[in-house]
Image (cartoon, coloured by chain):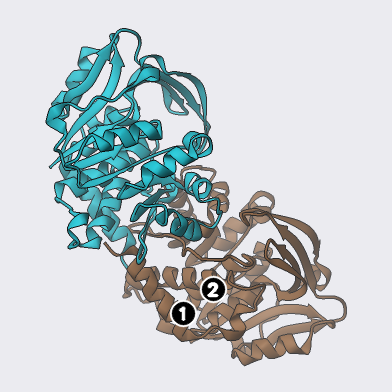
Chain colours: A cyan, B brown
Amino acid sequence: MSLVVIGSVAYDAIETPHGKRERTLGGSCTYIALSASYFAKPSIVAVVGDDFAGEDKTLLESKGVDLQGLETVPGKTFFWSGVYSADMNDRKTLATDLNVFADFNPKIPTAYTKLPYLFLGNIQPALQLRVQQGMPGVRFVGGDTMNFWISGNKRELLETIKHWDFLLINDAEARMLAGESNLRKAAQKILDMGPNTLVIKRGEYGAMLFRKDTLFMVPGYLLEDVFDPTGAGDCFAGGFVGYLAERGFDLRSGVFDVTELHRAVIYGSVMGSFCCEEFGVERFRTLTRQEIDQRFEEFRRFTAF
Amino acid sequence: MSLVVIGSVAYDAIETPHGKRERTLGGSCTYIALSASYFAKPSIVAVVGDDFAGEDKTLLESKGVDLQGLETVPGKTFFWSGVYSADMNDRKTLATDLNVFADFNPKIPTAYTKLPYLFLGNIQPALQLRVQQGMPGVRFVGGDTMNFWISGNKRELLETIKHWDFLLINDAEARMLAGESNLRKAAQKILDMGPNTLVIKRGEYGAMLFRKDTLFMVPGYLLEDVFDPTGAGDCFAGGFVGYLAERGFDLRSGVFDVTELHRAVIYGSVMGSFCCEEFGVERFRTLTRQEIDQRFEEFRRFTAF
């Protein structure tokens, strides 16, 4: 099944205790699309500058990513730079140059408008809403947001997520959005805001999925080496929604297997873990579906009792 | 099966965002024994002052705890006082008055010496070793330690844990003991120190069990309200070793089901979660085995995919 992904395509400069990269392909849309490409056909909507490298387009195309919605405009591509702490649980942003992303005005190619799955990466909530309104055929929609929109554009954000099937955020964002420090209570408040499904990412500690009547939890995959955590949350999103698109998961039919949502959380965790094994998007150059399914089975073994 | 537990019996003054208690029964040995009492018969070795209240003895006895090894000496019982932060992930110790615990010299009642299970709570490693040497009939032994002994008495600690079947510590202690920040690598180093089983507690984030050939992980139980986290780690220990004693788990026979160790981690998590639901040991006044088994089954539902 096809999946539309909106978000940023960027260049990143990253430093971790394992090394340094001066300019490597990044951005939420990039990570989500690459991760989802193992399960479904991602069609992206994003903007880059005229400095965007042909080889980066080639990488995306080699994974079957539809680039019709990737607009190129004069100027520079979004650039982010950051340094991770020794334990990699913390990072310091050195630069955020929005460049052409500052005026990002998502345009949905006609070919996308009838696609069934939509993931709205972290951009201004009003833009997320507009994109959704432009896709009347969508039947499973959700997305991500961040502290910046929660604190600065809350009303707009609430109006946007009201129409989502799922919201995928981290624990700090969930607490902030709900104004409640207890995660279980925070989750119930967020489910009252519209989405019927809430996925909370907790980085190395795993993830949780909440619905009115169910709760699912998974611990984080324990890596031997974390090279670079950049993009892990977005890869989680790509695995989550990619798997559901692959399965043709149809929440709105009223007939669905909630266990598929749990498996989607596991695939999200699997994809997030692979992302950390190399710098930037490097791991996706070699990663195979077989490795992904093997790690999914590892999760079964690690959690069976 | 009977289980010998060594550690502290204390009085605590506790303040959390939910309230305050001026003097409530506490101490690692108390929590471990109360928690384990739902699965096995705990026989404790500890020391209290002549201020120790009859009603506290009665509580322990009502749970079937064998108090032959509870020595009463002139002076005051160990006293600890602390205040928790608003999110309860941090606490500040206001007072640690060792009192009679300063000269704790564990004496094993003859009736205990042939008991099969032994849990060595966090005391000086040399004392832990001496207790183990005094129990030749033991066939499953392990314990806890803390940063103080890891940094100050490392050689002594290594000599002690070399003879243990399992070590049960938190993630910060595991990293410190191994001198390695990656938990997976740290665990392998610790398994080389002697224990064939390592359980790492991560508080609200759950727990992990490592053996040379297997890894088991469980997320933390998500409570609606955490009243007081004091003793949760010790209750985890009590549930873990108590369940194994109940099952007659015999690691040294060479024939055992490793899944029983996983279930023991779940029972540990269950007991740790109940502990947080009320102040001090209060929850154990009403807690039933049925509630415990129900929460064990909840863990199954929460983690199935």
Tag 2 and tag 1, C-beta contact below 8 Å: yes
In the rendered image, residue A62, in percent from the top left (x then y), is placed at 14, 26
Instruction: Say left or right for B121 vs B70.
Output: left
Report if residue A72 is visible in the image: yes
Instruction: Say left or right for B209 vs A138.
Output: right
The residue depicted at 61 percent of the width and 87 percent of the height is: B65
The amino acid type, in three-letter code, at marker 2 is: Phe
Badge 1 is on which residue? B292
In the rendered image, residue B94, in percent from the top left (x then y), is placed at 79, 58
In the rendered image, residue A50, in percent from the top left (x then y), is placed at 28, 9
Badge 2 is on which residue? B274
Q: Is residue A22 above or below residue A180?
A: above
Could you say which quadrant of the image residue B83 lies in? bottom right
- What kind of element bears circle 2? helix
Quarter of the picture containing the C terminus of chain A is bottom left
The residue depicted at 33 percent of the width and 34 percent of the height is: A128
Q: Mark 2 and mark 1: span between their CA atoms?
A: 8 Å
Q: Chain of mark 1?
A: B
Report if residue A22 is visible in the image: no
Could you say which quadrant of the image residue A8 lies in? top left
Could you say which quadrant of the image residue B285 lies in? bottom right
